[in-house]
Image (cartoon, rainbow, N blue to C red):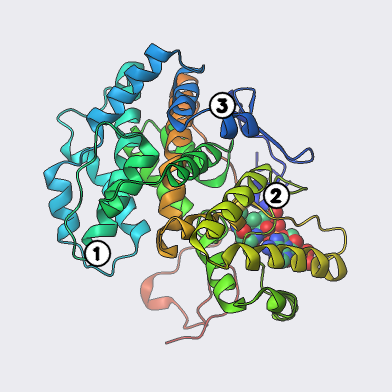
Amino acid sequence: MASTVVNPGLEGIVVGETVLSNVEGELGRLTYRGYDIHDLAERANYEEVVHLLLFGRLPTHDELAALNARLAARRALPNGLLAMMHATPRDAWPMDVLRTGVSAIAHFVPHRPDGSHETSIETAIDLIAKVPTIVAAWDRIRRRLEPIAPDPKLSTAANFLYMRTGEPQIPEAEKAFDTYLILLADHSYNASTFSARVTASTGADIYAAITAAVSTLAGDLHGGAPSKVMTMLEEIGLPEKAEPYVHDLLARHEKIMGMGHREYKTRDPRAAQLEKMAKNLTEKSHTKWYLIARALEDASQKVLHEEKPGKKIYANVEFYTAPTLSSLGIPSDEFTCAFACGRISGWCAHVLEQFGHNRLIRPQATYIGPEVHPYEAIGTRRVQAATNGNGAATPSE
Ligand code: COA
């Protein structure tokens, strides 16, 4: 029987269970398997968080060393994939290259995943290791530079920064990117994770599920927001210009990127951590982006309070991501790829969780098209205005 309640955007609809992360939107709290994100950001490293998500608990020293060794052994890209990337037009969008790259890894594995938990874990580690390498390699290939091989002695964060530049990193930069990866690692049933779970629920393998997740992350309402935040910061140019800029934006009925969230009705807890990093890094690199971002957040709060009272629109994770990543030398069209470098661990953990308790995800839609009517033979059809599929007329050719 057709459902009569329509929930576009699935807002407020619970479609599954997870033990991986909990977003408490009213409290502004995010936890991974019960650990507060602030504790993890300040005290753990990214690989510990990967272990927590994949294996259910924080690792001992030996377990962490074993995971680091498995990641290090899998970071290098297959030659076939590198050849594909070299053949890609240099102006290809980094997220397109990442999406194709993730999908293509599957061509180069000797055996398809057999669905067992052990093989799925192995594939997850492979993807967690290789996603940052694809992003760093494309950054170099598109600049007509040779990709730099990963260094097995370095962490995920340090390797990513090293593979882009070939330079040793200052500890602050490594720590900042490591913390960024932790903050972005998981976020319950966000759109890209949900997309991965839908794909996994059909029995498709982990490569297919992660390819779907990367595709879903790309949009401006999800992982595409921070590059648009950077564009705003560049257009504003000076902190004192932030308030008139926000007025203009809202007058054009446009959104302030990096503001607002479906779940958080207070400031995103990750924004506080990112703000600290952005302030610290921009001071060191003598750039103005933090000061403009700070002024933009203040102006947004003031103007939104006046123009959209009661809407509860606050800075989300993407807002201070822009000045943070920019200070680390990452160009704005790679920000969404940097997001994927962290979220890959959460996506994989969710796919494993879905495999463990699978039920095909298949919602319903309320049909609002024409009533049942007879089929017209081709010679008897009348010429009529074409519609856009929703009943509205579209210009005919
Ligand atoms: N700037 C201005 N107004 C905003 C806004 C923003 N960033 N975010 C939401 N609003 C307003 C909408 O205009 C709408 O107002 P209205 O009722 O007067 O039309 C209201 O708040 C509800 O917005 P809606 O987009 O329907 O809510 P949502 O729950 O779907 O929004 C987002 C969640 C993330 C899609 C939305 O806040 C947004 O587009 N933010 C900017 C993009 C971004 O930063 N994305 C990254 C998310 S982590």
Above-or-below relation of 121 to 98: above
Viewer-proximal residue, 45 or 119? 45
Q: Which residue is mark 2?
A: 6
Which SS class for mark 1?
loop
Measured as percent of width and height from the top left, residue 210 is found at 38, 40
Q: Nearer the viewer, mark 2 or mark 3?
A: 3
Q: Which quadrant holds the N terminus?
A: top right
Quick one: label 3, few (<14), some, or many (20+) residues within 10 Å? many
Question: What is the total number of numbered labels drawn onto the structure image?
Answer: 3
Which corner quadrant of the image does residue 94 belong to? bottom left
Instruction: Identify the residue shown where x is 36% and y is 41%.
Output: 158
- Residue 41 visible from this viewpoint: yes
Mark 2–mark 3 distance (CA, rounded to whole Å): 28 Å
Question: Is the CB–ligand 1 distance for label 2 below 8 Å?
Answer: no
Sooner in the amino-acid sequence: mark 2 or mark 3: 2
Quick one: label 2, few (<14), some, or many (20+) residues within 10 Å? few
Q: Are marks 1 and 2 in contact (CB under 8 Å)?
A: no
Which corner quadrant of the image does residue 334 belong to? bottom left
Q: Nearer the viewer, mark 1 or mark 2?
A: 1
Q: Are marks 2 and 3 in contact (CB under 8 Å)?
A: no
Q: Which residue is mark 3?
A: 20
